[in-house]
Amino acid sequence: MNMMLKYSIMNEIRKIYQTSLMELLSQANHVHRQHHVVGEVQLCHLISYKTGGCTEDCSYCAQSARYQTEVAPLPLMQKDALFTQARAAIEVGASRICIGAAWRGVRDGKAFDTILEVVRELTENGVEVCCTLGMLEKHQALQLREAGLYAYNHNLDTSRTFYRSIISTRTYDDRLQTLKRVKKAGISMCCGGIIGLGESREDRIALLHTLSQIKPESIPINFLGAVEGTPLEKQPPLPIWEMLRMIATARIIMPKALIRLSAGRIERSLEEQALCFMAGANSLFIGEKLLTITNPTFNDDEKMFELFGLKKRAPFKAKREADAAGQSPQN
Ligand code: SAM
Ligand code: DTB
Ligand code: SF4
């Protein structure tokens, strides 16, 4: 990209991010109303197919084998147990099932074949399926697409510059390459980041800039879950205002995307979550566990949906709308 152009877009994003908070929230809410049904949220549910024992050194992660955390590696999840969990989540309104694996990347073989079967079966049951399995080769992205995979989650986490102080076992370009393969295979791209890793505001703005270039269809924004035993265990939490700025800026610069409140909801009050929805968040994970860390219980969330008047988004809505307009569901 032309450097002059890059700087002028970065300046624009910085200006938005630093707008006075009430003005920023008001603008973001206005954009949100123009592009989305007010109060409609997508409910996603995460299932950990392969937990722990990961070779990578992501400094925030409970599943890295390099750190002494409470997470012990588990055998691969059985297909039956996976379907039971997925069915329970669909019954209470989840429209997207996200299957995670603590892998550096996918390796061809039995475990991946099982994932392909599960993707096929769940998709046939009318639910959006997302996978987050680490890096993908081109042929693996195509196989996932062929099995019916709707979305692939692969986060950039932070800015290119800060990335190397968080992870040393792979590069920002490795991540971008997998994201490119996902898009090329015709899979909807889910890509976001984490705030509170010790990054600066400029790093958060740079992440938003990169996201605005690659245009994910969904953007998870995680608060760091500071896991005991990881290098980031003592990292102090960021104030909610920074999360609101992140969500609101993402909403303004990527108006059509789904913005997902991800890790860290459990530590946030109902009032704080209400502000996140006002700022433009319209997706969340349900279920009392994410992959390994705690999330609000479904009962608590039901009370929140009731209190806020939130409506659950139906599966494949973006695809139906894009088909009707003769476009691709990606922005
Ligand atoms: N191994 C795969 C990978 O790294 O892409 C998939 C699973 S990984 C757990 C998915 C994402 O979860 C990470 O990229 C990171 O953004 C987020 N994540 C992991 N641990 C987290 C934590 N402690 N707090 C917040 N987000 C976290
Ligand atoms: C994402 O951005 N957040 C989800 C999902 N994508 C895979 C995971 C969040 C927390 C994972 C940490 C854990 O539960 O161990
Ligand atoms: Fe492994 Fe993914 Fe955790 Fe990194 S974030 S250690 S790749 S499971």
Image (cartoon, rainbow, N blue to C red):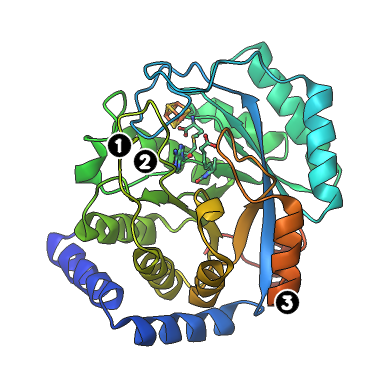
Q: Are marks 2 and 1 in contact (CB under 8 Å)?
A: yes
Tell me the CA gap for discs 2 and 1.
Answer: 5 Å
x 54%, y 64%: residue:
269
Give residue 111's position: percent from left, percent from top. Answer: 66, 16
User: In this figure, which residue is indicated by the disc labeled 3?
Assistant: 309
Instruction: Say if disc 3 is inside 8 Å of ligand 2.
Output: no
Q: Position of residue 224 (x, y in %)?
A: 40, 46
- What is the spatial separation of the Cα atoms under label 1 and label 3, in whole angstroms? 41 Å
Given the image, on which type of amino acid does mark 2 rest?
Leu
Kindly identify which residue carries mark 1: 173
Is there any visible trace of residue 95 in the rendered image? Answer: no
**Distance from the alpha carbon under mark 3 to that under mark 2:** 38 Å
User: Residue at coordinates 66% horizontally, 46% vertically from top-left?
Assistant: 150
What SS does tag 3 mark? loop
The numbered disc on residue 43 is none
Q: Are marks 1 and 3 in contact (CB under 8 Å)?
A: no
In this rendering, the label closer to the viewer, 1 or 3: 3
10 Å neighbourhood of mark 1: few (<14), some, or many (≥20)?
A: few
The residue sitting at 17% across, 60% down in the picture is: 2
Ligand 3 positioned in quadrant: top left
Count residues near mark 3 (Cα–Cα under 10 Å), then give few for <14, some for 14-19, many for 20+: few
Q: Which mark is residue 176?
A: 2
Instruction: Say which label, 1 or 3, has the lower sequence index.
Output: 1
